[in-house]
């Protein structure tokens, strides 16, 4: 009933916008990372023609990230932080999402609103809240000393791995719980009941039905928080500020905001983006499989 | 999970036993889970409430409560949000960006969603694919790419307000598309077709039938775009030209690393309350407009979930 | 003294950019004019070895550079332009608004400030024609870009008698701008150590090598910080080992300095930021590398009630062993009021104006003959025990230590070393 050109025309402004301000910029990072540097002005000279790309900077980045390179430790630290933070997020988030989806009953609406609320409170506000609590005379020390967990105040902001990891968990967990909840909430009770009727133990019903059926939520939420955590540089700066807790994002920040050679920063950005794309592809493959498996369970 | 093992007044089965009990009866009352959930909620919200409380502190301490005062909002002649140009400018800049973002990203996003949902021709697949990327690209990657494109390609655009708006719209469009497209799928095509059968011109079918049906999604996406723009730190920071173009999150970040005064809590509180009000208004409007379409509890989920689909 | 004391600390360190600006030559768009200009400059070089931005010679305290004039200065004896606006291109809140208004009233112009985030992005905006200011702030190590890019105008010093009259002789004809062809100095500062006297028990100033304190700070773990500047951190590690060539491009020296810095992870879990002017008075940091004005600013603006001024300590090496820097002002080539611009430069070097700007607003010390540390102490501007925060003419000059522009390779060497330090070592 509509003219044939209407829908492409309708999409045009948005597509154009994303091409000009998303695709082209990304290509600009490539052109800078694979470009050259003006020897006198020290200014990056982007190379727009892929045939003339110079992989020297990328090699430099790989050398630095390899064992023995100056970024090896910070790379490993970043992965360790993200993996531990992700594990903690799942450990806390899964029971919360599970309870909300299945057992909250008439409280469901309220609990959901309370769980969603942190999503609308800015990340920096939530970090500020913790920085205040973690001061030496702050509430965290007072509570821990009052409950005899600690005998003297701890310097939580003195550059600790634990503080950075917990800050990451606090910052990102709301983004994980929601997709988890959505996945768990979608699970049809009849699948579980069928499993039980067929003699599955509760544990195996959980393991064979609930867990696989929530796999898409787990993976989706995990991807949703893992990708930004890998690019984080502000959280360690806020709650620590020590090089011993810095992440790979701090290096990108340094090379763009801290001096010459944005070329190196651009090359590191490309490597990070490539690494995250691999994670993403792995996620998409697993999702496809999970959906196939879920289909099998559904047919149970 | 250790939190659930705390001893209670009357003899309790061990956490493990209770956990086992929970597995045995998946529909029973899982008290451990309930405790975890409420502890989580306290943990996620109480620190923020304390930060709000200290924005009203009478002294400059962020840790010791010395009584109620409005000095950090307007009372203090130098350091209050009202009197400190760095803070009041940041507030103005945050609102400026968020409003511009809504005004630009929502129309473009709605049109794009319509186009993508209905356009079945060559190129639609690619467009769909591109649309998804801003949702998963880490902000630092986007920040780097926008900074480089403004310094090497679109050199006529300086860092500062214009660049920040362009950046915010870029990451916002996809959110609008996701929300509006979900709505498009749920309302289907039958209303428009019915309108056409009744003799409506395509234009009238679009404006009188489809647009009102999309209104809940449009309102909701406006609220979401406002919130994500107000929350954004990385893009605002990378594309800031300093001074008056620093937004509230940028100011909070800078102050938090040093020795923040309660005025920083105050500006964060103002921003948070504004965002929550706008999101609540969006949520209520959404609920009002979709009344009768779904069971009530569902709307809250949609509101939370629609930016994550 | 990264930030104006009244200014909120910015995410991007202003001072950081002053120091690094060398590299940010990178920021200037359009290599053409710079390269074209550098052809005419080499004859003036004393050969510091290597070239900096725009191919200009590298200036060092003991290697003066007189920059070529790319056009003739304005003639003497002209009347100042009046009416319209007069634009100062500067860091936000880096000049007392009241004094700008007084200048405007005197000459019937409206003075406005166009802020920039850092000098390099400012120069880039100037080059792109996005702004048309009359005067701007610039630093010795960004000067090359301004001149080679023909972004700032040669001066006629007849209009600026206050330069000769009021300013330290060392900066009247400074090494980075022989004959003061383009710039007049605005502020100056030195790098040292700030600490909490009530927390740090060592007599830092009395140590054989005060910089060693960072390597002996186990007791203050988590409360120790360094400036987040590649030149300052690595330079400090060099100075500690007695290497006074803080512009060295010898990879062995720089890498050794970096591995010395890396010992600090274990020793004190060192932090890196430029926030010492707030965190030391506030008490969240006890020992920090610092600029000379930080504790003055901390004393005036950030010391909480109940903490005595004597809790703030500052040490810097004696003249000739302490890194020093200064900022400048110049006339932009976009000005339509060249005479008035000259008069503005003269105005900011006026004893009364510069002093008021320093004491009542800025906290950044101008290099005035009249400023006498003892007098500042007498007037209560500076607490007695922080008298060494005030620089004197002796502190600059040919035997002073200054972080100068490096060659391209040198910048990479320092930056990569700093990156290595910031990466934080084994986890």
Image (cartoon, rainbow, N blue to C red):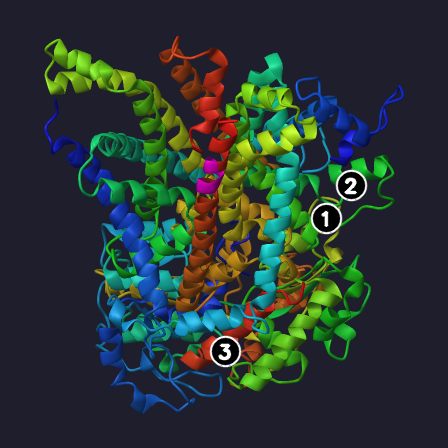
Residue placed at 35% from the left, 69% from the top?
Answer: C26
Helix, strand or loop for the magenta stretch, by majority: helix
Q: CA distance from mark 3 to mark 2?
A: 43 Å
Relative to B265, is A49 on the left or the right?
A: left
> Which residues lie in the magenta part?
A288-292
Whether residue C296 is visible here, answered yes or no, is: no
The chain holding disc 2 is A
Percent across and percent down for residue C110 are 29, 48
Q: Is tag 1's residue or tag 2's residue first in the polypeptide sequence?
A: 2
Q: Which residue is mark 2?
A: A141
Which quarter of the figure has residue B166? top left
Q: Disc 3 on helix, strand or loop?
A: helix
Percent across and percent down for residue C50 are 40, 87
The chain holding disc 1 is A
Where is the N terminus of chain B found, in terms of image quarters? top right
Residue placed at 48% from the left, 70% from the top?
Answer: A62
Which quarter of the figure has residue B178? top left
Residue placed at 36% from the left, 55% from the top?
Answer: B145
Please tell me whether residue C415 is drawn above or below residue A112 in the rendered image: below
Q: CA distance from mark 1 to mark 3?
A: 34 Å
Q: Disc 1 on helix, strand or loop?
A: loop
């Amino acid at each position: 009933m509509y003219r044939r050109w209407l829908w492409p025309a309708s999409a045009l402004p948005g597509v154009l916008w994303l091409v000009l301000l998303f695709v082209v910029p990304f290509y600009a990072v490539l052109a800078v990372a694979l470009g050259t540097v003006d020897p006198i002005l020290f200014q990056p000279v982007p190379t727009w023609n892929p045939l003339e790309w110079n992989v020297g900077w990328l090699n430099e980045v790989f050398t630095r990230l390899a064992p023995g390179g100056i970024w090896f430790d910070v790379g490993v630290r970043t992965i360790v932080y993200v993996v531990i933070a992700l594990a903690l997020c799942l450990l806390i988030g899964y029971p919360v999402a599970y309870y909300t989806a299945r057992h909250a009953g008439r409280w469901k609406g309220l609990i959901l609103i309370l769980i969603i609320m942190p999503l609308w409170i800015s990340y920096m506000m939530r970090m500020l809240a913790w920085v205040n609590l973690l001061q030496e005379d702050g509430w965290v020390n007072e509570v821990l000393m009052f409950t005899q967990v600690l005998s003297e105040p701890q310097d939580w902001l003195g550059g600790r791995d634990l503080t950075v990891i917990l800050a990451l968990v606090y910052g990102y967990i709301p983004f994980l719980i929601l997709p988890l909840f959505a996945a768990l909430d979608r699970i049809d009770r009849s699948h579980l009941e069928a499993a039980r009727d067929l003699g599955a133990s509760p544990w195996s019903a959980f393991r064979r039905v609930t867990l696989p059926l929530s796999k898409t939520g787990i993976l989706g939420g995990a991807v949703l928080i893992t990708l930004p955590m890998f690019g984080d540089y502000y959280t360690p700066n806020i709650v620590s500020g020590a090089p011993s807790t810095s992440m790979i994002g701090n290096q990108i920040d340094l090379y763009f905001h801290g001096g010459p050679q944005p070329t190196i920063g651009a090359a590191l950005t490309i490597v990070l983006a490539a690494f995250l794309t691999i994670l993403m592809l792995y996620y998409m493959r697993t999702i496809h499989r999970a959906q196939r498996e879920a289909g099998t369970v559904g047919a149970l | 999970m250790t939190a659930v093992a705390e001893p209670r007044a009357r003899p309790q089965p061990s956490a493990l036993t209770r956990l086992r009990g929970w597995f045995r009866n998946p529909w029973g009352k899982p008290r451990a889970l309930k405790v975890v959930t409420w502890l989580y909620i306290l943990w996620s919200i109480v620190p923020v409430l304390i930060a709000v409380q200290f924005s009203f502190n009478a002294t400059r301490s962020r840790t010791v409560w010395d009584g109620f005062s409005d000095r950090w909002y307007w009372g203090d002649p130098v350091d209050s949000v009202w009197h400190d140009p760095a803070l009041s400018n940041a507030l103005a800049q945050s609102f400026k960006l968020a409003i511009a973002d809504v005004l630009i990203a929502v129309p473009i996003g709605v049109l794009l969603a319509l186009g993508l949902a209905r356009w079945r021709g060559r190129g639609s697949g690619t467009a769909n694919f591109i649309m998804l990327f801003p949702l998963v690209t880490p902000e630092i990657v986007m920040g780097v790419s926008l900074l480089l494109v403004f310094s090497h390609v679109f050199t006529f655009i300086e860092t500062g307000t214009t660049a920040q708006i362009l950046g915010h719209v870029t990451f916002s469009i996809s959110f609008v598309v996701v929300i509006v497209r979900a709505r498009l799928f749920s309302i289907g095509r039958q209303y428009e077709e019915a309108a056409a059968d009744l003799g409506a011109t395509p234009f009238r079918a679009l404006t009188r039938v489809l647009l009102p049906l999309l209104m809940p999604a449009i309102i909701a996406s406006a609220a979401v775009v406002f919130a994500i723009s107000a929350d954004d730190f990385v893009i605002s920071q990378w594309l800031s030209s300093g001074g008056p173009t620093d937004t509230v999150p940028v100011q909070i970040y800078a102050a938090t690393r040093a020795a923040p005064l309660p005025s920083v809590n105050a500006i964060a509180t103002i921003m948070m309350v504004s965002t929550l009000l706008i999101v609540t208004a969006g949520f209520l409007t959404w609920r009002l407009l979709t009344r009768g379409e779904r069971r009530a509890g569902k709307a809250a989920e949609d509101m939370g979930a629609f930016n994550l689909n | 003294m990264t930030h104006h004391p009244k200014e909120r600390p910015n995410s991007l360190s202003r001072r950081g950019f002053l120091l690094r600006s060398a590299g940010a030559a990178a920021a200037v768009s359009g290599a053409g004019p710079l390269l074209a200009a550098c052809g005419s400059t080499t004859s003036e070089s004393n050969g510091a070895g290597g070239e900096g931005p725009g191919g200009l010679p590298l200036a060092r305290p003991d290697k003066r550079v007189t920059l070529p004039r790319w056009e003739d200065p304005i003639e003497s004896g002209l009347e100042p332009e009046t009416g319209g606006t007069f634009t100062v291109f500067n860091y936000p809140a880096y000049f007392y608004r009241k004094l700008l208004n007084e200048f405007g009233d005197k000459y019937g112009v409206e003075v406005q400030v166009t802020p920039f985030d850092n000098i390099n992005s400012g120069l880039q905006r100037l080059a792109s024609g996005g702004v048309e200011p009359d005067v701007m702030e610039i630093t010795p190590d960004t000067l090359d870009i301004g001149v080679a890019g023909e972004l700032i105008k040669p001066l006629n010093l007849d209009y600026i008698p206050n330069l000769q009259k009021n300013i330290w002789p060392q900066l009247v004809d400074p090494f980075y701008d022989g004959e003061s062809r383009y710039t007049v100095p605005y502020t100056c500062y030195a790098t040292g150590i700030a600490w909490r006297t009530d927390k740090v028990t060592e007599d830092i100033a009395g140590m054989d090598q005060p910089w060693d304190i960072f390597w002996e700070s186990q007791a203050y773990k988590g409360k120790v910080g360094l400036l987040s500047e590649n030149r300052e951190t690595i330079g400090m590690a060099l100075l500690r080992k007695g290497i006074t060539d803080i512009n060295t491009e010898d990879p062995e020296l720089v890498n050794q300095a970096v591995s010395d810095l890396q010992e600090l992870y274990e020793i004190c879990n060192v932090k890196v930021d430029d926030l010492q002017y707030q965190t030391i008075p506030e008490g969240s940091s006890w020992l920090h590398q610092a600029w000379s004005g930080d504790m003055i600013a901390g004393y005036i603006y950030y010391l909480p009630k109940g903490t005595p001024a004597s809790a703030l300590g500052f040490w810097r090496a004696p003249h000739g062993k302490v890194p020093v820097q200064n900022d400048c002002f110049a006339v932009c080539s976009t000005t339509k009021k060249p005479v008035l611009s000259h008069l503005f430069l003269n105005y900011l070097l006026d004893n009364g104006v510069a002093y008021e700007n320093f004491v009542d607003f800025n906290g950044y010390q101008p290099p005035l003959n009249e400023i006498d540390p003892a007098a500042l102490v007498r007037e209560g501007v500076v607490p007695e025990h922080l008298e060494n925060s005030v620089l004197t003419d002796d502190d600059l000059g040919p035997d002073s230590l200054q972080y100068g522009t490096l060659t391209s390779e040198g910048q990479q060497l320092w930056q990569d070393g700093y990156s290595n330090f910031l990466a934080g070592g084994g986890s």
